[in-house]
Image: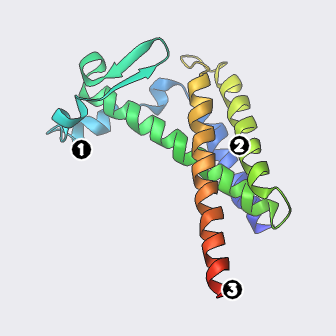
Amino acid sequence: MKKWLILIAFLVVLAISSSMTYEQQSIIPELEQVLANKPFEKQLSVLKIPYWDTVVSVEERGYFKFVEFLIRKLTHFVGFGCIALGIYFAWGKRRFAAGAAIGGTALIATLDEIRQSFTPGRTMSGQDIILDTAGAIVFVGIVVLVKKIFKRQRAL
């Protein structure tokens, strides 16, 4: 039961965060304080990330908005990776646990993006669904790989 509670906690956090407007989620004021010296600005200025019908960069958005963009996308990747692990471990040792975790996470990501499209100032993004699913694949893939390595070592 504890395994399901962890998954439910992740889903509650997701529901709360996707119900917030961009302004409510913005961390730009905090970034302006913490990163006042603009660390790694030169290195970040090299990055140009295609997103929607535009290219997101320091030049296009400014340093703080670009850093916030990176943090928001990293949060997608890690957050949905954690949701996938929640599903994977809640699923237990049943067959297709990895596939159920990845597929379930992709479904949750899709439903979340649709739901988010009803929040003022937020939009639905297929690219976010891909990023969320990639997080699920990477996180579950690492756990499956580590389990196989430990299983192989025990057999020796």
The percent position of residue 43, horizontal first and vertical second, equals: 20, 36
Q: Residue furthest front?
A: 156
Marks 3 and 1, the one that precedes in the sequence = 1
Kindly identify which residue carries mark 1.
34
The dot on residue 56 is none
Judged from the image, the secondary structure of the residue bearing numbered disc 3 is helix
Judged from the image, the secondary structure of the residue bearing numbered disc 2 is helix
Q: Residue at x 53, y 25 (%)?
A: 21
- Which marked residue is nearer to the observer: mark 2 or mark 3? 3
Q: Is residue 121 left or right of residue 152?
A: left
Picture quarter with the C terminus: bottom right
Task: For residue 19, say whether it is visible.
Answer: no
Marks 1 and 2, the one that precedes in the sequence = 1
Q: Is residue 141 left or right of residue 121?
A: right
Q: Relative to 150, is 17 above or below?
A: above
Kindly identify which residue carries mark 2.
105
**Mark 1 residue type:** Val
Mark 2 residue crowding within 10 angstroms, few (<14) / some (14–19) / many (20+): many
Q: Residue at x 67, y 38 (%)?
A: 15
Q: Quadrant of residue 139?
A: bottom right
**Mark 2 residue type:** Thr
Do the CB atoms of the residues marked 3 and 1 lie less than 8 Å apart?
A: no
Q: CA distance from mark 2 to mark 3?
A: 32 Å
Q: Relative to 52, is 100 above or below?
A: below
Do the CB atoms of the residues marked 1 and 2 lie less than 8 Å apart?
A: no
Judged from the image, the secondary structure of the residue bearing numbered disc 1 is helix
**Observer-nearest of 57 and 24:** 57
Q: CA distance from mark 1 to mark 2?
A: 33 Å
Q: Residue at x 64, y 25 (%)?
A: 116
Kindly identify which residue carries mark 3.
155
